[in-house]
Image: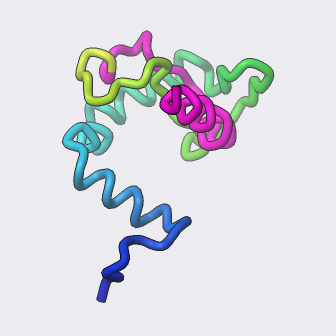
């Protein structure tokens, strides 16, 4: 039985499921079109993290993210624009880029 108090702090899987259910544009990430676009960005950037100061080259594509330079917030034009995408390694995306976006959201 799910908690009636909400999700447990730090429960990322629940947070992602909740976000996927509530945001219509999240389904775009599960399409063949997105997978093709993602791979073309990784290839274009030669599987190299574009974060300034990183430059990590990663052969394991599960450790790479096609990151939106400008957050799309459901804007289809920004979401599908390959010039708005860059290859980031997961550590840079999950730590540095997310921290940067959270700080901008607070402003």
The correct choice, above or below, for 87 with respect to 26 in the image is above
The image position of residue 61, as x and y in percent, is 56, 40
**Magenta range:** 79-107
Q: Residue at x 77, y 26 (%)?
A: 54
Residue 68 as seen in the image, left or right of residue 49: left
- Check if residue 101 falls in the magenta segment: yes
The correct choice, above or below, for 94 with respect to 54 in the image is below
The image position of residue 26, as x and y in percent, is 28, 42
The image position of residue 23, as x and y in percent, is 24, 44
Q: Residue at x 24, y 37 (%)?
A: 25
Q: Residue at x 45, y 29 (%)?
A: 39
Q: Main secondary structure of the magenta part?
A: helix
Question: As drawn, which residue projects farthest toward the front?
Answer: 107
Residue 80 as seen in the image, left or right of residue 92: left
- Check if residue 1 falls in the magenta segment: no
Q: Residue at x 31, y 81 (%)?
A: 4
């Amino acid at each position: 039985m799910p908690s009636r108090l909400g999700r447990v702090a730090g429960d990322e899987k629940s947070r992602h499921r909740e976000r996927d259910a509530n945001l219509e544009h999240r389904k775009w990430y599960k399409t063949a079109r997105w997978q093709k676009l993602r791979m073309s960005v990784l290839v274009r950037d030669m599987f190299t993290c574009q974060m300034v100061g990183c430059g990590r080259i990663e052969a394991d594509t599960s450790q790479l993210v096609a990151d939106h330079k400008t957050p799309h917030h459901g804007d289809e034009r920004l979401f599908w624009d390959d010039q708005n995408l860059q290859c980031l390694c997961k550590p840079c995306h999950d730590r540095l880029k997310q921290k940067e976006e959270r700080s901008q959201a607070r402003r």
